[in-house]
Amino acid sequence: MRINKIKKMMTEGKPVINGWLQVPSTASAETMSQQGWDSLTIDMQHGLVDYTNALPMLQTISASEVTPLARVNWNEPGQIMKILDAGSYGIICPMVSNKQQAENFVQACMYPPNGYRSYGPVRGLIYGGPDYAKHADTELLKFAMIETKEALEKLDEIMSVEGVDGIYVGPADLSLAIGEEPGFDRPEGTKAYDQILRILDHAKKNNIFAGIHNGSPEYAMKMVDKGFNFVTISSDQRIMGLGAKNIIEKIKGTKTQEVSKAY
């Protein structure tokens, strides 16, 4: 089976720089896949992407050396299994709040006897190789998102579930969960920033990977310095919007409306 390069990188202590795809377009996926990202995550939760868009995007990414991942829209076995069958090499699962939900997520990603994933990898065999089923349980990454009040109370319970490779911090929902305004790049001194570092400490204690979504490269590198293994910066939609905004502001000499702080 094709080695999961980013899992190998993180195991060796090298940070993974992850890009984020929200635009349902093979053109966007192709452009992003040629820019040097270690991995690209197709956002099926808050992006505009559904399965019929995601499949050709995965095929497009496969023409590069970038590792393809997907964030599903919920902890739902059918969707998880189907996007893995399509060739995603890892899943970021939102709103994992307790041990049972973590176990359900992991088991949907793994074949019996470790889980209840149904066999039929289809494109997984093409991208991963003919021995896909033999190694998929260990090669494919499983990230549980920590972003709810309940999850903050049950960090070790979630992180100690066998098969959880790592956690992924969603700063916007995390901020909402503790009574702060949603957004990324939470400043020092905020409750969200303190919780982010606490989540990271628990991930280190449980010997699993830690990922986080960031709004800027500067903040992402700050998080790498703190010990995060996997950092996402912005998204294709935001990068396009910010690039256009900067051009217009320089030419017209005027300030345009700030781009949304969402994904």
Image: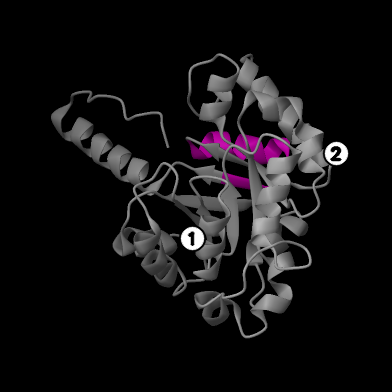
Depth check: give the residue in front, 78 or 216.
Answer: 78
**Residue tagged 2:** 205
Q: Is residue 15 visible?
A: no
- Above or below — where is 173 with respect to 76? above
Label number found at residue 36:
1
- Residue 193 counted in the magenta span: no
Q: Position of residue 152 (x, y in %)?
A: 71, 26
Q: Position of residue 176 (x, y in %)?
A: 53, 21
Tell me the element at label 1: loop
Residue drawn at 31 percent across, 38 percent down: 242
Q: Earlier in the sequence, mark 2 or mark 1?
A: 1
Cα distance between the residues tagged 2 and 1 = 31 Å
99 left or right, relative to 50: right
Amino acid carrying mark 2 in the image: Lys
Residue drawn at 73 percent across, 78 percent down: 134
Give neighbour class at mark 1: few <14, some 14-19, many 20+ (Cα, 10 Å).
few
Tell me the element at label 2: helix
Give neighbour class at mark 2: few <14, some 14-19, many 20+ (Cα, 10 Å).
few
Overall secondary structure of the magenta section: helix
157 left or right, relative to 234: right
Query: What range is drawn magenta here?
Result: 216-231
